[in-house]
Amino acid sequence: NQEGKCVLIALPVSKAEAMKSHWFKVKIAFNLKQDEITLKIHDQEKVCKGVLLSDEFSPKIVFGKSDHIIDVPEIAVDKLVVNAEHTYTFPLDEADGESVCNQEGTLYGKVENPIWLINEAYHWRKEGGFASASEAGSCYNADRNEIYYFNRDSLFVYNMETGSTSAKAFAERCPVKLFLAGSFFDSGSERLYAYEVYTENGDSEPMIASLDLHTLGWRVESYSRLSMQLHHHCSYYDAVRKRYTIFGGFGNMYYSNKFYMFNAEEGRWNTLGSLSGDFLCPRYFSSAGYLDSNHSVYIFGGMGNESGDQVIGRCYFHDFYKVDLQEMRVQKLWDISEGQPNMVPAQDMVILNDSCFYVLRYPESVSNSFLHLYRFSVEDGSCHILGDSIPIYSDKITTNARLYYNERQSRLFVTVQETSDDVSSKFSVYSLLFPPVSLEKYTANNGGGNASHVWLVLVAAVVAVAGGSVWIVYKRHRNSGKGEDGKAVRQDKEQLPEASDVKVEKMAVDTGTVNSMYLFGDFSVFDRNGRNISYMFSLRIKQIFCLILRYSDADGISSKQLSDLIWPDKPKVKVKNSRGVAISH
């Protein structure tokens, strides 16, 4: 636009196409000699001629609020480049503060009130949660970007894009008697499938039923059952062929290495045909991912043994297999079990291409532990831990965690379902900006150092490039407004009425838990927003923290004394490195 005069270029963008991608590629070019302005959005381009541009001018580039426009939407800026006589590149990859550096790390300007998105790529954000007094399951609708949590009476819906929640009672009870409460979602028919693989009541009990999202009515799909229970099996859904397949699991003192496939048209479980190639050991607690591009399923990790007999004992697997469903062949890609900790992956694998995949891992034998996100190379198994941790209580067998990727929002979502009695459960939803970053990357940026990875800053006000300086001002995220003091505050989500025994978890912040530490009773630490960050303190970190606090009223604690107390049996050379890493954390 020419301010206050006319529209120079208008480029219509399809809303449907826009919603498929989180980012717009925008380029604006000024040709001063030919009096032309070019606007390009993705692959669309328009040129405006005869604008009567000056031979020289100093542009003021604005994203959001300006002197003339104050009502603007929030936007995120990534990879800001200004080409003139010199090229000015602003990575916007800082993690805190108001200083802006160019890609060489030279201080170049100031940002006003930024929200640095690298923080959202490291810290998992708890979106909310709810609870059920009876057995419950969950699944993900990729088309609607909704997470479903259900029991036999009610359905709870969390919308990933809007953050809205709803709870509804079914027209009739789910005909399947839920225990493990397995489930998957078919986008084509918009039906949620709930299933159990085993019951001791023979073939008289419904084993698979589907829910129509529009009518909230259930329909029995199958009475077919397997010969044994399969605790902690993994699964994947082929939406093109409408086949749901499960692998592995544990029951009747045996581990399984079979693939069972459910076809809705046949209404029964069938064993996947004979597989050639490498031997895939019987196991449970594995992770599975499916790539339609090569019609292959990938299996990672788990616990089990070669015979499948639980009496022999079990070992932890840290191996990776590709199962080609066209050639019906198993290929072992790598095994990195040596030196790995005793950890298992959560059942869902996010694999977007054949170069890497993401999984959650945790020590399932520890009741109170933490989930960590790992990125593994498909080629050689090299891995990185990304983001901080998520607490999980895994004392009971129906406890589970699931990992989803929302392409439109460029975010990872994790659901954690915890139970103390294998009946009632608490359900929590977390999110992390994609791609996630490691602790090393995050701490480097927190220290103000330059990083090679181009990062982001969420803004909704001004980016002005004039006289060699950059200014960025922001408006808060969604669900935010202004308090009486003029500061941005987050609004509480609408509280929903209870539906059956599903209830919304209240997320109110206690002012007594802001910027505070509790050392008596449960060890607890709360940040300036009242967020409980206790889960970031491992046992070793707690010990070091308490020792430093204990000696802080004197002359502190020496490195030798700290090492002798925490690592009494380690060689000095190894202690020095461990101590440095632990203190940094």
Image: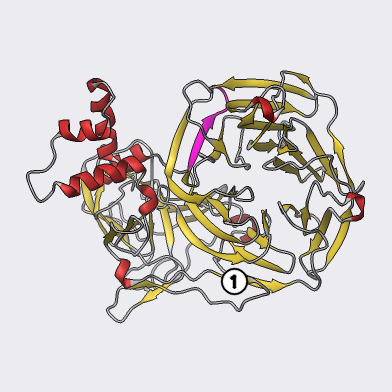
Q: Residue 579 placed where, x, y %?
A: 25, 32
Residue 375 belongs to magenta span: yes
Q: Quadrant of the N terminus?
A: bottom left
Q: Which residue is mark 1?
A: 503
Q: Quadrant of the C terminus?
A: top left
Q: Residue 351 placed where, x, y %?
A: 61, 37
Q: Is residue 99 left or right of residue 386?
A: left
Question: Does dot 1 land on a helix, a strand or a loop?
Answer: strand
Residue 309 belongs to magenta span: no
x 7%, y 44%: residue:
555
Q: Residue 338 placed where, x, y %?
A: 50, 20
Q: Quadrant of residue 421?
A: bottom right
Q: Is residue 8 above or below residue 560?
A: below
User: Is there any visible trace of residue 393 in the rendered image?
Assistant: yes
- Per the picture, the main secondary structure of the magenta-coloured stretch is strand
User: Is there any visible trace of residue 84 in the rendered image?
Assistant: no
Local packing at callout 1 (Cα closer than 10 Å; few below 14, some 14-19, many 20+) is some
Q: Quadrant of residue 178?
A: bottom right
User: Which amino acid does the dot numbered 1 rest on?
Assistant: Lys
Numbered circles on residues, count: 1
